[in-house]
Amino acid sequence: MNAPLKLSKDELEILRDFERSELESIKNFRDEKRKLEETARLTLQKDKRINIRLSSRDLERIQKKAAKEGIPYQTLISSTLHKFVTGKLKSVG
């Protein structure tokens, strides 16, 4: 007997869109994939080092959040800064 498939909220949304035929194939998939891979490579390339001072309390909170996400805390900080400078960080409140 197979266990029921457990899908995340995002996966359920993709499945619903697929079942409604709302998804479209990407024209020139290989070219688009290559462009996206190159963009990701350049975005993720870390070629500068900085030093910052944080309060112990903030660093502990960051480390706890990173542990919850299963990523190193430096990666969480870098990702958050990247989202901020690209306008993808949404304000809370």
Image (cartoon, rainbow, N blue to C red):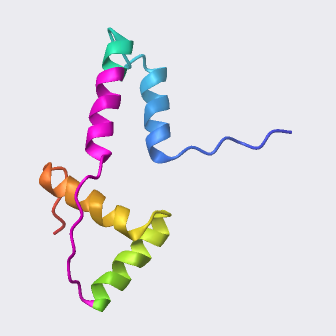
Tell me if 5 is positioned left or right of 57 in this view. right
- Residue 43: which quarter of the image? top left
Q: Give above or below for 28 relative to 47.
A: above
Q: Residue at x 29, y 23 (%)?
A: 35
Pick the residue in front: 69 or 92. 69
Classify the position of the N terminus by image quarter: top right
Name the spot of residue 74 as percent of width and height, x first: 35, 67
Q: Give above or below for 1 relative to 61.
A: above
Q: Residue at x 15, y 48 (%)?
A: 86
Asked whether the viewer can see residue 78, the reply is yes
Q: Residue at x 46, y 63 (%)?
A: 71
Q: Residue at x 34, y 64 (%)?
A: 76
Name the spot of residue 12 as percent of width and height, x first: 49, 38
Name the spot of residue 32 as percent of width and height, x first: 31, 18
Q: Give above or below for 16 relative to 42.
A: above
Residue extending farthest to the top is 28
**Range of magenta residues:** 34-55
Name the spot of residue 62 as percent of width and height, x first: 35, 76
- Residue 65: which quarter of the image? bottom left
| Total numbered badges shown on the rendered structure | 0
Pick the residue in front: 73 or 50. 50
66 inside magenta stretch = no
Classify the position of the C terminus by image quarter: bottom left
